[in-house]
Amino acid sequence: MADGPVAERGVLTAPDEVWDRAVRQAEVIGPLAGKPMVGLAEAEAAATQLGVSRRQVYVLLGRWRAGHGVVSDLLPGRSSGGRGGGRLPDEVEAIVQDVLNRWYLTQQRRPVSAICKEVARQCRVRGLRVPSRGAVARRIARLDPVISTAAREGREATRPLRSAGGTPPEITGLLEQVQIDHTPMDVIVVDEQHRKPIGRPYLTAAIDVTSRCVVGLVVTLEAPSATSVGLCLAQAAIDKRPWLERLGVEAAWPMSGKPHELYVDNAVEFKSEALRRGCDQHGIRLRYRPPGQPHFGGIIERLIGTLMRDVHELPGTTFSNVAERGAYDSDAKAALTLRELERWLALAVCCYHGQVHETLGRTPAGVWAEMAATAPPVTVANEMAFLVDFLPVVRRTLSRSGFVIDRVQYYSDALKPWIARRDHLDRFVLRRDPRDISRIWVLDPDGDAYVEVGYRTLSRPPISAWEQRAAVARLREMGRAEIDENALFAMVAQMREITDAAAADTRKARRDRQRREQAPPRPRRAASPPKPPAGQTGQAEEAMAQPFEVIEQW
């Protein structure tokens, strides 16, 4: 098995009902497990809160301490039905949910007894076992109280269930809430080889609300996606010293740790299954801003606005709009590569941490150091292991030759035990990094760990998901009805040759080439900061000198 992340049983295979119950249990069991001893009174209070016996509380404590301290430690075994499990046959469950939607969540306000009678009637008509009143009542209790009250009594009746005036709760702890957002940067970057313009990159940033410290920063040529969010979270959770060394930045950035809550807007990349389950797995609450109220994310918006204001001082800036840009030729003035821009941003953030913040009246670095001294944040040792839990999810069945995703075959000897009993296994949960699809991570059938699996044909080069899609589209244009793996990789090779040949002339080709070179480094391969091409050293130094003047003006 690969040195990948632990993914305890059912992280992605457990039904939502079972998973949600485990999440609620973790909110109660997690704090108790940190105590050296849990007395009878505390166990009784936890049992009442969770609706289980006191003995079951101690069972859950034992599983949490014996495991990895994550939600999946509390998931029941596959064979469990058990007393209090609340499981119903799928057909009966569907009837209950349908009756709740059509009979209970209406302004008719039918009582529970009427709901139970209707469920019983429909079950008898279909020859199914009638669920108990308690089973139906438990499902009613699990309904969102705001949604339920709005459906039965109107939106005005939900006011007591919401925070007063829509004011968010006060945030006082380090990493208690981290806000994250994306933006296209107001600057044109150049490619590494020809130093010609390739367009605007995207910035994903994360900020700790309490200290106002920037905890995560990712610059990419790819549009915002669930992967961008995962990369930013992974960078926020790990020690940043190796990253700073790769960039050649001699500065301190000690702000790292897993956030307790992630506060985001309602963009599609923040509502992916990968992000939701990844946050649940690592105990990170995921909260969304109220729609149409951007001021709820004002802290991250202000940070991005500050960064973009100072980016306007860089060569190649596009400014905020056409009127501000005027006759300034952004393409002609562009001088920074993506790596140099990332280095400039790292230095800018480190300087920002050392300056007095208007709201705090202190430096963000000082607030962080003071609070971290009493309650050090929980950091992540293995960045890749953490990142895999946030990569996009793919589900596939296993064949004798392994897995096939987008016409690419994946195989490893580690799959042999599963191939022998594949007829008795469900579809597998796979994770894949769109930047490099040469390997996938497969969740084993028992949910114990991820296994890294590479191409079945090892001689294939690493490619990205966007290259794969572009090659398929090109083959379709050529009239290919069926596309096999050989044709796919042959087309990718041809497209790369065309891109390399045209890179000196075509903006899109240079951008495509830079995107390809931005793929994540392979294991144990050290990354080094890029050097400017011969004959252009002065230009690079001039491009990097101006940002430092800007930093000193902050």
Image: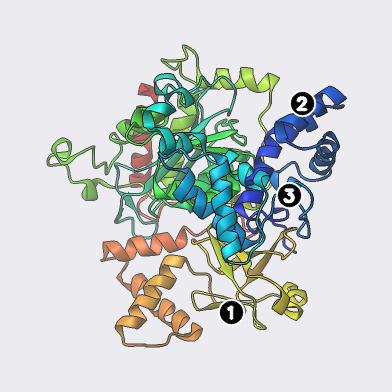
At numbered mark 1, what does the secondary structure look like: helix, strand or loop? loop
Residue 532 got which mark? none
Above/below status of 507 relative to 144: below
Q: Position of residue 392 (x, y in %)?
A: 53, 58
* Direction from residue 117 to residue 65 in the image, left or right: right
Query: Callout 1: few (<14), some (14-19), or many (20+) C-alpha neighbours within 10 Å?
Result: few
Which residue is at the front of the view, 504 or 383? 383
- Tell me the mark number nearer the camera, choosing from 2 and 1: 2
Is the residue under label 3 in contact with that under label 1 (CB below 8 Å)? no
Image quarter of residue 393: bottom right
Image quarter of residue 414: bottom right
Residue 45 got which mark? 2
Distance between mark 1 and mark 3 Cα atoms: 50 Å
Q: Amino acid at mark 2?
A: Ala
Image quarter hosting the N terminus? bottom right
Distance between mark 2 and mark 1 Cα atoms: 60 Å
- Tell me which label, 2 or 1, sits earlier in the chain: 2
Q: Amino acid at mark 3?
A: Gly
Distance between mark 2 and mark 3 Cα atoms: 20 Å
Q: Amino acid at mark 1?
A: Ser
Which residue is at the front of the view, 442 or 71? 71
* Direction from residue 362 to residue 504 in the image, left or right: left
Query: Callout 3: few (<14), some (14-19), or many (20+) C-alpha neighbours within 10 Å?
Result: few
Q: Which residue is mark 1?
A: 459
